[in-house]
Amino acid sequence: MPLPEESIGVPAPVLDRLGAAGYRAMIAGVRLGVFTALEDGPLSVDELATRVDGDPAGVRSLVNVLVTFGYLRRDADGDGVTTAAPLGPVDGELFWHEVLFEYWADVEDTIRTGTPRRDFYTWLRERPATAARLRRTFAGAAAALADDIAAALPPAATVLDVGGGHGDHTVELCRRRPDVRVTVFDRPETITGLREDAPPDRVTVRAGDYLTDDLGSGYDLVLLFNVVHGHHPEECRELLRRAAKSLSPTGSIAVLDHDREPPAGLGPAAAGFLGTFDLTLWLGQGGGVHHYADLAAWLGEAGLTETRVVPLAASPLEKLLIAGRPS
């Protein structure tokens, strides 16, 4: 497809269209099993077509696109192909494809009215396979970050995991901190799905609305992991105030989330992801990706003025924000 003359050297809309085509081709490769078939090494296009039970001409055409966009690379002989780089978790790729091409289907209406046609979690409950993919993605992310998080968190015997969902971070923390006991607080429909490997003698659950119900008191540490992005600023302020009230006098709050200000040197793709994530959160929950400077200020309003930010090597766009009272 030739580029329009006026687009040469200019980031024209056609380039966005081409990028979308590359992304869609990658999803086709995932669904067909192309990348799985190549995990053990290079294959000729005909061998690949046999492995994925595809038409050789169609597979060859798809391979050409995937090579062009850098997902695959050709061997020296020109016919064999292999993956160019690790694709990343397949569950995550399929989840985001469904979000962008299904959940965003009526994005224009939501932007006009300010009201989503369907709450994100309602949409998710209607798609068990999508929900299962997201669950596996969350569990994998928690495991990948667990060592860095456990090393950064202050000593604590009693922990409140607010919005802790199925307990992914709680389970990983218990594995690395044998001294902690954790209470997971979340909505009733979520808390019933607590992971089976959560140690029953160290993990308890409480169902409720963390914006209105009593959170308890006397905790050494409160976790707000991937929670604040689901809320607009005023709700975040109220949540942080309520979390601070549940602490012991020497307790701390730890926030894990994406920072709206990406680290320097990550390039435009980082800002593009954060913008995409932000719009998705607003569409489905009225939330968004917050600046960590704002979170620190809101924690200060709640009396937690001693803050530190811990970068996470396994996820450069996420950070740990730990806040406590002045000593």
Image: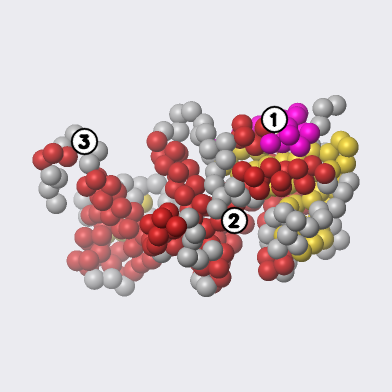
**Which residue, given by chain and number where applicable, does mark 3 sit on?**
10
Please report whichever mark, 1 or 3, sits nearer to the chain's N-terminal start: 3
Residue drawn at x 40%, y 36% is 268
Give how far across and how far down residue 78 sits, in percent: 21, 50
Q: Regarding mark 1 in the picture, which secondary structure is present there?
A: strand
Q: Residues within 10 Å of mark 1 (few under 14, many from 20)?
A: few
Which residue shows up at 69% across the image and 30% down it? 308
Determine the residue positioned at 61% across, 38% down. 319
Of the two numbered discs 2 and 3 in the rendering, the one whose residue sits closer to the viewer = 3
* Residue 230 image offset from top left, x and y in percent: 60, 52
Amino acid carrying mark 3 in the image: Val
- The residue under label 2 is 138
* Residue 62 placement (x, y as % from top left): 25, 60
The image position of residue 248, as x and y in percent, is 88, 41
- Secondary structure state at the residue bearing disc 3: loop
Residue 302 appears in the rendering = yes
- Residues 129 and 55: in front is 129
Q: Is residue 149 magenta?
A: no
Magenta part of the chain: 298-316
User: What's the residue type where badge 2 is placed?
Assistant: Phe
- Residue name at image x 23 percent, y 54 percent: 64
Whether residue 171 is visible to the viewer of this picture, yes or no, is no
Whether residue 310 appears in magenta in the rendering, the answer is yes
User: Which quadrant would residue 42 be assigned to in this image?
Assistant: bottom left
Residue 219 is left or right of residue 47, and the answer is right
> In this image, 261 relative to 171: left or right?
left
Mark 2 or mark 3: whose residue is earlier in sequence: 3
Mark 1 sits on what residue?
308
Assess whether mark 1 and mark 2 are in contact (beta carbons under 8 angstroms).
Answer: no
Pick whichever, 303 or 148, lies toward us. Answer: 303
